[in-house]
Image (spheres, grey):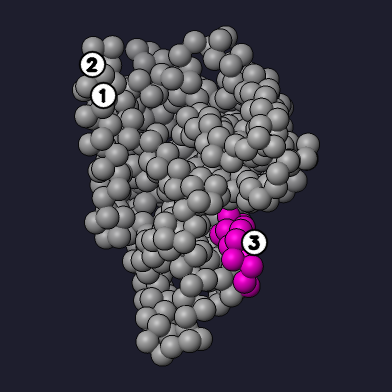
Amino acid sequence: MILLAALFYLAGVPSNPPGFHIDESSVSYNAYTIAETGRDEHGTPWPLFFRAFGDYKNPVYIYLLAGLFKLVGPGIWAGRLLSALSGMTAALLLGLLAERIARRRDVALLTALSALLTPWLFETSRVVMEVALYPLALALFLLCLHRVSARAKWSYLEIGSLAITLALLTYTYSIGRLLGPLLAFGLLLFATRERWASLLQTWCAYLLTLLPLFLFDRHNPGALTGRFKLITYITPQSSYGEIAVNFIRHFAGNLNVWRLLVSGDPNPDQVVHLSGSPHMLAGTLAFAVIGGFLVLRQQRRSAWWRFIFYGLFISVVPASLTGDYFHMLRLVALPVFLLVLSVPAFAWFTERARLGRGWRMVFVFLIAFTLLQGAFFQWQFRRNASAPRRLHQFDAEYPRKIFAQAVAAPLRPIYLADAPAIPGYIQAYWYATLRGVDPSQFVRLSPAELPPPGAVVISTEENCARCDIIETSEPYTLYIAK
């Protein structure tokens, strides 16, 4: 069963989702330039954060992808495979963590299967974006933490593993700049007289890993906070009371069970999400709730389980500081903690199943319902691969309708004219890379600059007043300038 579920992660790679989203092209093109020249698309050598689209992308995924491109060459299949393998590995590591918690192989298999079938983790592993790596980074941290949770003193290797995985959480995705320090602070839950030295050493080692981030921020003021200022409800005029009320409102909204189990992310253009589908399976959430109840009843003194509840709470904090409700990418740590909470329930049910027919029926029903709902989601995901919305979101027609015809035209260079909110130039650079076209054949125009008469232009601008249109594929227009 685990093998079958794992095959779902590889089936459809790289063709589903169709095409390649503009953010995927940005990540992939920068990974390619790093692999080839050691510089990003702007010529910056070995950047810590990658400037793109007025924001900064995080380094871990891009450098991993650069290494893969160095081995096998650039390609959509390579990027999508990296994401799929990251998601699958995260699920298997959660199974390994469950085995160490419950000391039962059947519990490990059930946890891994539940993680593999979770729509939230599956969808984030379908795209070439930094978020695809985050569940894996969190699973690694929790494995390291569980290893030391019962030890009176921690070895230097264990301290180093905690610091490195906290650093991974910080540098892998933008929410980690808050979530990483919050998780590090939560290590206080393990404080004892014998562990204080180990805790202080862990914090010091983690702080050392943050020095590059502090230096980058010092030399690039606002680079890492500019995006947050655009999406948060916190302003210089906000009072503490207003901030508190907004935080509570958004925190509650981010725990909306209907969105979790039925409708999903409210943004219909959320590229990682199949609109209208659930994030979690009902059976998985039921096991997590039962597991939480069992922990509160039987193991509430356990520092490990107190940390898991703490992690569940703070996983909602980064998203709750922004103006959106239930933004699945900013909440991506939440399903990992819910899956860990399901472990006590799996252990309890497998024991009860041997004792009584009633408990066995409840257990079988929940497992069967999880499998059926998981299979239904997989069917939905694959059925919608060629849906018009998905084709549009991932620019599926761009290679054939726009790029191929632009390159086939004899005129050079090809000019790229973009609307400020739609930086379509990166699609031209990425597909040029895939098809062996020299990027120097493309010239980016500044916002106020007009192409010369007779030039071939690929544009994402809404209006085309002085042009002969050759082809369109929203939001792209291929035309000859007059």
Secondary structure mostly seen in the magenta stretch: helix
319 or 405, which lies in front? 319
If the image is split into quadrants, where does the C terminus sit?
A: top left
- Counting from the top left corner in percent of width and height, residue 210 is at 62, 23
| Disc marking residue 100 | 3
Res 454 quadrant in image: top left
Looking at the image, tell me whether mark 3 or mark 2 is earlier in sequence order: 3
Q: Which residue is labeled 1 in the image?
A: 243
Is residue 225 something that shows in the picture?
A: yes
Q: 288 left or right of 153?
A: left
- The residue range painted magenta reads 88-105
Few, some or many C-alpha atoms within 10 Å of disc 3 (few <14, some 14-19, many ≥20)? Answer: some
Q: What distance separates the C-alpha of mark 1 from that of mark 2? A: 6 Å
386 or 45, which lies in front? 45
Looking at the image, which residue is at 22% across and 22% down?
241
Q: Amino acid at mark 1?
A: Ile
Res 468 quadrant in image: top left
